[in-house]
Amino acid sequence: MVICGRGKLGYINGDILRPATTDPTYGTWELNNSIVMAWLINSMEGHISRTYLFFKTAKDMWDAIKENYSDLGNASQIFEIKLKLKDIRQGTLEVTQYYNNLKVLWQELDMYYEVDWGEGEEHTKFMTHLNKERLYEFLAGLNRELDEVCGRILGRTSLPTIGEAFAEVRREEKRRLVMMGDLKEPKPMTIDGYRPTENSALISKGPQPQGLRARNDSGSTRPWCSHCNRVEYTKEKCFKLHGYPEKNPKENKAALVPSNTSTIVDEVLDVRLTKNQLEALHKMLCTTTAHGSLAT
């Protein structure tokens, strides 16, 4: 491309021949010939370019390169591109990136095709067929969430061009990103527009550790003893169950209480009286009080 753009293609295809050394144009030819040879050398990898440093003309160098590295009919290059097209998928790419990757492969494939269809009816038929094939390749590699727009495109009586299909799919991708972007990151359920915060009771925190009460309004967590029904310590550190520290020996009597004492107390606290039993107990207490008053 660079050689052709600089008007130097004749130096490698033989159109511009080497003049005699006595010719007035020889100096210009030698200058341009050296420039083209330098372009060819610089376009190669170092271990390859070393074998072409001593050629006299750009044409001789080009003929040797073509003989060594040219694949007749470009069959291997076409096969390699076809393999890439078969495996390419959108994956984590945006639609635009995925489409551009396909276009690069398609353009490279077009470069290797040497069939000239002219400009007549045959050319039109070929281009229509080629557009369908590439449209199918493009749609087949899209992610599953874009199946709906793919169905709309394929359901038309007249299929769009590959460019029109890309534009429609890209619009659908943008619409989904704007309208349904929140589906990727679920938020806590809201009630009447209220979104609970991290400390809100509407958000489940999972099971609380034993001996800890729920967070109060200030956000702090205070220990709770289920044996004494008191705040400031847990059941595991209850003095009534486990005894007082050694510095208070008089208060350490609770440590000598049999371990089943707490069980008995818990059972007593768990007694449930019926209404009739409560009334009988009340009458008995009243009678006892009356007898005590008379004795006095």
Image (cartoon, rainbow, N blue to C red):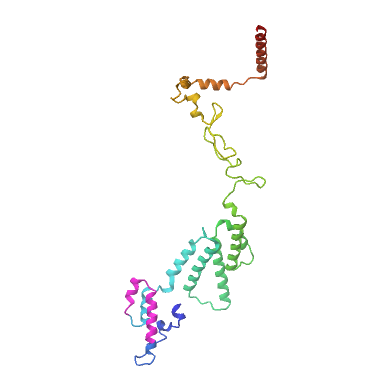
Examine the structure image and report whether residue 39 is included in the region drawn in magenta: yes
Residue 113 relative to residue 147: left or right: left
Write the residue at 60% across / 60% down: 174
> Where on the picture, by quarter, is residue 59?
bottom left
Q: How many marks?
A: 0
Examine the structure image and report whether residue 280 is included in the region drawn in magenta: no
**What quarter of the picture does the C terminus occupy?**
top right
Of 267 and 120, the residue lying toward us: 267
Q: Position of residue 292 (x, y in %)?
A: 65, 9
Q: Position of residue 141 (x, y in %)?
A: 53, 60
Compared with 188, 56 (above or below) is below
Q: Position of residue 240 (x, y in %)?
A: 50, 24
Q: Give the magenta range.
A: 29-54
> Where on the picture, by quarter, is residue 276?
top right
Of 171 and 210, the residue lying toward us: 210
Write the residue at 61% across / 57% down: 178
Secondary structure character of the magenta stretch overall: helix
Compared with 64, 228 (above or below) is above
Compared with 237, 172 (above or below) is below
Q: Position of residue 58 (x, y in %)?
A: 37, 81
Of 258 and 288, the residue lying toward us: 288
Compared with 258, 236 (above or below) is below
Write the residue at 50% across / 20% down: 261
